[in-house]
């Protein structure tokens, strides 16, 4: 009986008792969710255009962040470092297209997946050689990102504290999602991207250059990775550990659907908020630490009922 | 329908007149490892004609089309396109040179609607600034509207108005083939390659498709090369027929002449070689 009370009733009593704390928890979860969503967005981009799960997205986040910070350490002003980092992601995209994607045209997806795993280890090595293995401080204030915080009083019910950097992260994520949605649905290149994702041969026959499309989409994923790197880096450090955090995008993708940009956002938020609330209110029942696996359990439950994700394209197979 | 035939579109981007050689294949051979798919084949396609390529299964017909639109590069021989010997050409370059095609096993963008599928065919002709496209405003919007109008004409022409917004993965096979033809037509090609446009269709669908092919040829002056197994269709549609067997050319000429050719009869009936 005690057990049931602890699971079913007590957490909600706590929530009602301290609404300011609940709001704070939801906000923290929201911000974490936005960051997950940003990472998931990078995966979705590549998946949409080539049907490949890009294992290297996580390391691209690290690599982009390291490039930015590393350049600044070498004395480059922050704004120039940002432009150069974008340039580096562009070069990376062209190289990936030329040396990885192009020779593997028409190969089964599993081979492309293996290639992205190979790329991951290559980039880890390259990153360590160039920038060293120690964690670095993100140049938040140099980039003009806000660092303070605002406290909202809720009458006599306490107060909620919002970090400005978190608000900035949410706004930037929103802008990116909007931009990408327009890009995919409205532009000629966006249409070509969707075409390539569907059928390589057919895309070639209507005059779409696969090479060009892939370079563009990897570059777009690189930009998303850079934004993610900056935001994650501002909250913790820029280090290779981020690469593991990036795998949190997996449950997000399962939830939102591999092909859906809005799905990545909603999925990210559900996972972010869900795991924070779960950890705070139910975590103590099993000794805490459920934040690290709760996301996967949520994803598993979704898999049972909606294998294509919340917003994924329905799998239509004529037999 | 007149608006569809524009001077820089279908009728003559090369300036060739009807009856001139549009494409010539000279002594082309293609092999995969030790397997010879095509051996020393030569033939030509004249501007404005319907050219059929026939032959038993495995004769090298599809390989031939793949060579023409750049999916395969022959080890030997030359391809002359609009009077110029063509260097190694990639498929998307062939597309920009006015060669469109359909596939034996329908190759459509299954997750996209009929309309979007056909719009991809206009991609090469859209060149307005990327910035405007993102805004979906200004010159890019005008351009989009103009291309959409062309696409609507093609939709009317092929009588697929009702499925405009349907994801093509849900359509029955016969309609998918028609959407594929629509997408190829949207490219306003000078040469249209059709790989078994009527495979798997019932009689009525075949008749519809035959009518569309003839209309495309006659109204727009599009040159057509098609592979087809239904001999009735081939004899009705084509001006000239080239017959392949085991990767070699065994006959070439008007349908009635080919029909009575002893080698062709043997190839189809299976006389021991």
Image: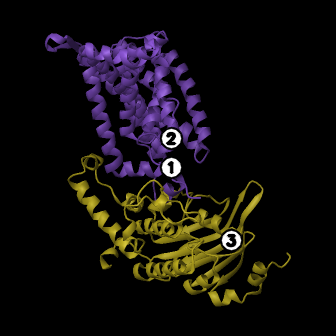
Chain colours: A purple, B yellow
User: Residue A281 at what x, y percent from top left?
Assistant: 38, 15
Q: Nearer the viewer, mark 1 or mark 2?
A: 2
CA distance separating discs 3 and 1:
43 Å
Crowdedness near tag 1: few (<14), some (14–19) or many (≥20) residues, C-alpha within 10 Å: few
Does A288 sit above or below residue B233? Answer: above
Q: Nearer the viewer, mark 2 or mark 3?
A: 2
- Tell me the number on the disc at residue A307: 2
Residue on which the image places disc 1: A315
Do the residues marked 2 and 3 share a common chain?
no
Mark whose residue sits in front, 3 or 1: 1
Question: Quick check: can you spot residue A36?
Answer: yes
- Reply above or below: A112 against A75: below
Q: Chain of mark 3?
A: B
Q: Nearer the viewer, residue B7 or B211?
A: B211
**Distance from the alpha carbon under mark 2 to that under mark 3:** 51 Å
The residue under the point 54% across, 79% down is B206
The N terminus of chain B lies in which quarter of the figure?
Answer: bottom left
Residue on which disc 3 sits: B41
| Real-space CA distance between mark 1 and mark 2, rounded to the nearest whole angstrom | 9 Å
């Amino acid at each position: 009986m005690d057990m049931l009370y602890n699971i079913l009733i007590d957490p909600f009593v706590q929530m009602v008792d301290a609404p300011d704390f609940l709001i704070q928890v939801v906000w923290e979860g929201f911000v974490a969710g936005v960051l997950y969503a940003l990472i998931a967005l990078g995966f979705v981009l590549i998946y949409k255009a080539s049907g490949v799960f890009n294992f290297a997205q996580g390391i691209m986040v690290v690599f982009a962040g390291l490039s930015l910070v590393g350049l600044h350490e070498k004395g480059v002003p922050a704004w120039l470092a940002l432009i150069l980092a974008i340039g580096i992601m562009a070069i990376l995209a062209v190289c990936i297209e030329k040396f990885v994607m192009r020779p593997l045209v028409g190969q089964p997806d599993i081979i492309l997946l293996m290639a992205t795993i190979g790329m991951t280890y290559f980039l880890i090595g390259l990153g360590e050689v160039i920038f060293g293995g120690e964690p670095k401080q993100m140049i938040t204030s140099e980039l003009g990102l806000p660092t303070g915080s605002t406290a909202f009083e809720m009458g006599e019910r306490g107060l909620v504290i919002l970090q400005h950097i978190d608000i900035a992260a949410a706004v930037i994520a929103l802008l990116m999602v909007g931009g990408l949605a327009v890009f995919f649905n409205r532009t000629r290149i966006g249409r070509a991207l969707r075409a390539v994702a569907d059928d390589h041969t057919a895309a070639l026959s209507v005059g779409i250059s696969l090479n060009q499309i892939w370079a563009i989409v990897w570059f777009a994923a690189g930009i998303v990775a850079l934004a993610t790197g900056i935001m994650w880096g501002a909250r913790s450090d820029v280090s290779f550990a981020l690469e593991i955090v990036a795998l949190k995008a997996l449950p997000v993708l399962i939830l939102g659907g591999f092909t859906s940009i809005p799905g990545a956002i909603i999925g990210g938020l559900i996972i972010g908020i869900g795991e924070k609330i779960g950890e705070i209110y139910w975590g103590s029942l099993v000794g805490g630490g459920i934040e690290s696996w709760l996301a996967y359990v949520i994803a598993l439950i979704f898999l049972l009922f909606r294998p294509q994700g919340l917003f994924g394209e329905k799998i239509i197979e004529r037999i | 329908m007149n608006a569809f035939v524009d001077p820089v579109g279908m009728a003559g981007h090369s300036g060739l007149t009807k009856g001139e050689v549009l494409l010539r294949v000279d002594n082309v051979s293609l092999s995969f490892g030790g397997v010879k798919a095509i051996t020393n084949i030569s033939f030509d396609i004249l501007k404005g004609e319907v050219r059929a390529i026939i032959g038993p299964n495995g004769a090298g017909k599809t390989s031939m089309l793949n060579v023409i639109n750049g999916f395969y590069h022959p080890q030997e021989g030359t391809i002359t396109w609009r009077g110029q010997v063509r260097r190694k050409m990639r498929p998307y370059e062939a597309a920009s040179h006015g060669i469109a095609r359909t596939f034996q096993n329908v190759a459509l963008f299954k997750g996209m609607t009929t309309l979007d599928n056909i719009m991809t065919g206009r991609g090469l002709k859209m060149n307005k600034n990327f910035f405007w496209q993102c805004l979906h405003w200004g010159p890019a919007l005008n351009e989009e509207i103009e291309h959409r109008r062309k696409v609507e004409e093609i939709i009317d022409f092929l009588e697929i108005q009702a499925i405009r917004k349907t994801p093509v993965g849900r359509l029955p096979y016969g309609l998918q083939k028609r959407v594929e033809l629509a997408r190829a037509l949207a490219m306003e090609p000078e040469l249209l390659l059709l790989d078994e446009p009527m495979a798997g269709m019932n009689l009525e669908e075949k008749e519809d498709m035959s009518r569309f092919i003839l209309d495309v040829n006659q109204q727009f002056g599009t040159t057509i090369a098609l592979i087809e197994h239904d001999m009735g269709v081939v004899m009705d549609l084509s001006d000239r027929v080239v017959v392949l067997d085991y990767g070699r050319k065994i006959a070439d000429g008007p349908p009635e002449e080919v029909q009575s050719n002893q080698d062709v009869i043997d190839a189809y009936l299976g006389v021991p070689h």
